[in-house]
Every structure is written in structure tokens, then in C-alpha cells.
Image (cartoon, rainbow, N blue to C red):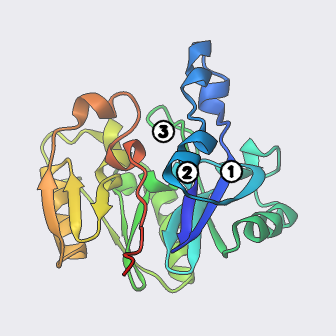
Amino acid sequence: MPIQLGENEFLKYRYYPDYLVKSKNKKDIETITDATKVLRGMGISCRSTDLIIDGGNMVPCGPYIVMTDKVFMENGREKGDTDFKVLLESEIGHPVIIIPWTSHEDDVYGHSDGFIKWCGDNRILMGNHGDCYPEEAASIRWILESYGFEVTEIRFKDKVDTPCYEFNWAYINFLQVGKNIIDEDAIALQYIQTAFPNCNIRQIEMKEIAKKGGALHCLSWNVYLPKHE
């Protein structure tokens, strides 16, 4: 589904990710939603781009959009291609912060919403990627801090007896609707409560769903609709 970039600003992109295109199960392609029909039914208009983008790889953080560098690969470009980044920012209409991504067995998607969550102002909550890949996490943190963000990392190492590292991305993949947050993990809850002190937080068991590669944020399309008089 399109990403909402402003109160009445939506961007529809080309959703054609390699994890579906290259899937051994060809029926995976059939799972792609026809966003045009959905938007027509909801009465929502949007602009479009032909760039291949994934909604999970676009995290609004104030004026910025944070994306992993997987977006270069999916569009047939070399990582760090400055011309492509200029094009990307022009199409999105917002400055883009690129964070590094490396394919791991527990992450073939390259979604930025599996790494970070904007907490408002200049604050970002980051998942516990650093528990398994400290150098990669440090690089992501350094980039975000260079843009003026204060980054808090979730860490389970030496705090949890049996952490589920295969779900590192899921701990930050919670759903926020206004001042209500739905989360999955009890220990991540402590970090989320600190990062969002004015929110009501509830939990729901998601492990079986997470095993399929997505959690609450992945499963939802969060839209702000202004109230009309």
C-alpha cells in the first residue's frame, strides 16, 4: 500500500520485492495487493513513482524518510549511487537517510522498520540488532546521530536468559495508532514505555505470525485521516 507522507499526501510505488519475485513458490506473486482498487474504494488519491520500493523500508522520522540501502539493489543500482539517491529524494519529495543492510539468515527483507522506530522530535528507538551484529548496529547508529537524532538501542544481551535473536527485527516492529501501541515482547515493553511515556501499551502474542516474516507493523497499513467539521 502507498506510504502516507503528509496529511493528504500519499505515494504509490512499484512493489516488486526480490523475496517474492525470486520465491520458489510462484503463488507468492499473487499475494501482492492491487492497491489501486483499494485506494479507489477508500476514496484516497495519490501520486505514483515507477521506482521499486517496499513500504516496510520507509520509516518517516520527522522531515526524513529512513531506508536501508537495499533500495539501490532492488532498482538495479550500486549501493551509494548518488544520482539514484537524488532521484529517490525527488520522487519521494523528502530527504532520505540511507542506513546499511546486509542479508542475514534472519533478515532477507531489508526493511528499515525492522531496525528503527521514530519516537517524535529527534528521538529514535532502535532494535536489538547490536546484540548479534554490533558493528552493523554501530554504523546505523552513527549515521542517524550524524543527522542529529538521539538513538536508544534495545539490548537483551546479559539481560535475558534465552533471547530469541531470530526475531531481532520483530521487537521494534510494533504498531502505533495515535497514543495507543500494540507490542509483542515483555522485555521490549520496558524500552517502549520509556520511549513513549504518554502512550497506552498493550501486548499480543505474535510469535507464530513472526515466524512467517512479519509482525504488527508489517501486517498493518497505518493511515492518518484528519477530522472534518
Q: Residue at x 41, y 67 (%)?
A: 224
Report which residue position mark 2 lands on: 55
Task: Give the residue type that dot 1 points to.
Answer: Tyr
Q: Is residue 159 visible?
A: no
Q: Residue at x 23, y 33 (%)?
A: 207
Using a 10 Å C-alpha cutoff, classify the residue at mark 3 as few (fewer than 14 neighbours), some (14 to 19) or many (20 or more). some
Q: Earlier in the sequence, mark 1 or mark 3?
A: 1
Element marked by disc 3: loop
Task: Give the residue type that dot 2 points to.
Answer: Gly
Left or right, residue 164 beside residue 96:
left
Between the C-alphas of marks 3 and 2, the distance is 16 Å
Q: Earlier in the sequence, mark 1 or mark 2?
A: 1
Between the C-alphas of marks 1 and 3, the distance is 22 Å
Q: Is residue 191 above or below residue 172?
A: below
Left or right, residue 138 beside residue 81:
left
Residue placed most toward the observer, 137 or 151: 151
> Where does residue 221 sit, x and y in percent of width and height?
43, 51
Q: Residue at x 18, y 49 (%)?
A: 185
Element marked by disc 2: helix
